[in-house]
Amino acid sequence: RLKNSCMKHFGEDTWEFIRDDSFVQWVLHPDEVNITRWEQWMAAHPERVRDIEKARSMVLALAKVPQPAVDEALLEDLYASLDRDIAVGHPAVEEIPTRVRGIGRYRWWGAAAAALAGIALVSIYLKKDNKTPVAAALNSHMENEQLTRVNTSNASQVAWLTDGSTVVLNAGASIRHDAFLLQNKREVFLKGEAFFDIAKDAARPFIVYTPEIGIKVLGTSFRVSEENGSLTVTVKTGKIAVYNLADKKQRSYVVTPNHKIRFNTLTAAFVADSLDNNELAELQPAVQPKPFVFDNTAVTDIFQAMETAYSIKINASEEVFGKCMITTTITNESFENKLKIICAAINASYKISGGEVYITGKPCG
């Protein structure tokens, strides 16, 4: 019955992707191999990109929905929202069915997020346990919409970036960047040691500046460390280009996975090398960024957790939203997609102004 409904709304051209195991694996569990494969496929078949996007939306929407629990009328509303969303090319935030907004009434996983964003690796569902993301112990301040965050603790801490990237700052390390990373280049200025996991965005390269070198990436994970007057960049996934900021020609050195490059700050020389087995085993962030998981939690508490994670002020009235309770798990999402998902759940809206976020809406209940 579910397949017949899918065929009705998406057609055979889309359904061929949905029943392709490698396609589903790419959508739900992307890795370097399947990302490369499907990007190459889309480049070779641009006329099929629309079908792929539609199939991707459906896979994300229904990835974890138990078929017996799906209300047929609600499913029809979801398909209609997805159709409208894809037709206009942007999230149908205002068109999410009223029954989808009432998250607590249904065990929805991907559906609400797919109708909202169309590209969400997101779960919104009921759970027995109540987990919250680790609060980063970072001192932060904003100046001219430039955000500086310093890890003053003795342990590594996670700093979330609004584009979906994360930075694990070692003790004493700091980063400075545009609060919302809205420029053509995503630029971060690093002092100290850190592990970066960068969200892929081919249109907007990500550049890390240390006092001596620049590191240019598109989507990858790597570590920056210091020892005995040298700065070492070690790549876990993807590729990076490293260059000396003092070199006017900016000649760069490409570093591939499981390799490292060392920059001697005294001689300004680069030395490349591969990793031995011990180094490979240790090439992990000191702490793992955790998903935002909440069970029947006040939305004001969720906004507070986001405010702590991103060091961005979120203005949400306790009087208006204090009784709004939602259950949600949000992973691998940008800051704004998180806002969209949460605001859709409580029928609210948000505005970004002056480096802060303002939530408006009506009281719940």
Image (cartoon, helix red, strand yellow):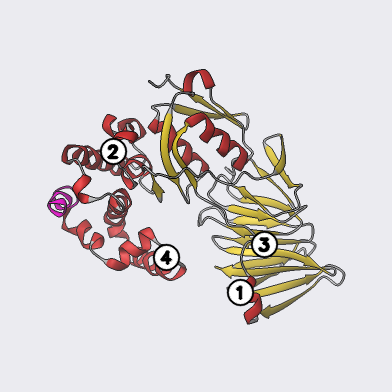
What separation in Å lies between label 1 and label 3 (alpha carbons)? 23 Å
Q: In the rendered structure, does residue 65 fall within the stretch colored magenta?
A: no
Bounds of the magenta segment: 1-10
- Asked whether the residues under the numbered discs 1 and 3 touch, taking CB atoms below 8 Å apart as contact, a structural biologist would say no
As measured in the structure, the alpha-carbon distance from the residue carrying label 3 to the one carrying label 4 is 22 Å
Residue at figure coordinates x 62%, y 81% from the top left: 277
Mark 4 → mark 2, Cα distance in angstroms: 32 Å
**Left/right of residue 49 with respect to residue 299 in the rendered view:** left
Considering only vertical position in the picture, is 54 above or below 221? Answer: above
Q: CA distance from mark 1 to mark 4?
A: 24 Å
The residue tagged 4 is 35
Mark 2 crowd level (few <14, some 14–19, many ≥20, 10 Å Cα): some
Q: Quadrant of residue 296?
A: top left
Q: Which residue is mark 2?
A: 106
Instruction: Name the residue nearer the viewer: 165 or 294.
Output: 294
Q: Give the position of the C terminus as an image quadrant.
A: top left
- What residue is shown with label 1? 281
Residue 230 x %, y %: 81, 69
Q: Which residue is mark 3?
A: 215
What SS does tag 2 mark? loop
Amino acid type, label 3: Ile
Above-or-below relation of 188 to 89? below
Q: Is residue 9 magenta?
A: yes
Q: Earlier in the sequence, mark 4 or mark 2?
A: 4
Residue 77 found in image quarter = top left
Badge 4 crowding class, 10 Å Cα cut-off, few under 14, some 14 to 19, many 20 or more, is some
Residue 45 visible in this rendered orientation of the protein: no
Q: Residues within 10 Å of mark 3 (few under 14, many from 20)?
A: many
